[in-house]
Amino acid sequence: DSGVTQTPKHLITATGQRVTLRCSPRSGDLSVYWYQQSLDQGLQFLIQYYNGEERAKGNILERFSAQQFPDLHSELNLSSLELGDSALYFCASSVAASAVTQYFGPGTRLLVL
Amino acid sequence: AQSVTQLDSQVPVFEEAPVELRCNYSSSVSVYLFWYVQYPNQGLQLLLKYLSGSTLVKGINGFEAEFNKSQTSFHLRKPSVHISDTAEYFCAVSERETSGSRLTFGEGTQLTVNP
């Protein structure tokens, strides 16, 4: 158990819908990362937040957005969902913005029908 | 920008045999190197990391990896595997000097240990 929690574990929804994935970092960690794991794209970095501020952006679609709240939990919002958004979404956390080691949560498996 | 290539998508081996999972990387700047393991229906667990110093790095579960700067490789090895080592293994890099520390992953290698 890494100490990073993600909810829900599984999510099934329809095309065009909007969902919110939630992540709570390890106690004491200020930085949160979101990654997407799909069959065709592999594991890709989406976005990083540090202490409430966006720190780095990767291959995140405009339909996706994220934020980190004062209690340091983070949410990833996915809207206008398409079949191709079906994937495993991981959250990771680290102590600092440029900390070397990231600890991964168990992931949220999203299925868009 | 950096990239990671894992040279084998699938590696089948017999129990108690040695194994090597190969990883090459490309980057215009200095990087940190990592190996993560993903067991079925679970998240990613850090096996080991190379930051600096000795090029031979030891990790959990008897795994080790060797950093070779001239060949830009970071191969993962285990002298004797167990059935429980069956999992997907990911090599990853992150830039040393950056305000963030995003990981760039390889495509993964599925290790299957057969009895």
Image (spheres, coloured by chain):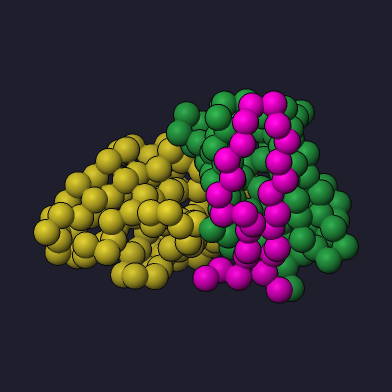
Query: Left of B107 or right of it: where is B81?
Result: left
Q: Is residue B35 shown above or below B60?
A: above
In percent of the image, x 27 and y 41: which residue is there?
B10
- Which one of the lettered chains is coloured yellow? B
Q: Position of residue A63 (x, y in %)?
A: 75, 29
Q: Is residue B104 visible?
A: no
Query: Left of B62 or right of it: where is A12?
Result: right
Query: Left of B97 or right of it: where is B89?
Result: left
Say whether residue A50 is magenta: no
In percent of the image, x 67 and y 40: which residue is there?
A46
In the depicted view, which residue is nearer to us: B85 or A5?
A: A5
Q: How many marks?
A: 0
User: Residue A66 appears in which quarter of the rendering?
Assistant: top right
Range of the magenta residues? Answer: A1-27
Q: Position of residue B16 (x, y in %)?
A: 14, 64
In the depicted view, which residue is nearer to us: B15 or B43?
A: B43
Determine the colour of chain A: green
Q: Is residue A63 shown above or below B4?
A: above
In the depicted view, which residue is nearer to us: A42 or B5?
A: A42
Question: Quick one: which residue is furthest to the bottom in this view?
Answer: A27
Q: Is residue A48 shown above or below B85?
A: above
User: Residue B55 appears in which quarter of the rendering?
Assistant: bottom left
Quadrant where the C terminus of chain A is found in the figure: top right
Q: Position of residue A42 (x, y in %)?
A: 49, 36
In percent of the image, x 33 and y 54: which residue is there?
B87
Say whether residue A25 is magenta: yes
User: Residue A77 appears in which quarter of the rendering?
Assistant: top right
In percent of the image, x 43 and y 38: which residue is there?
B107
Q: Is residue A19 visible?
A: yes
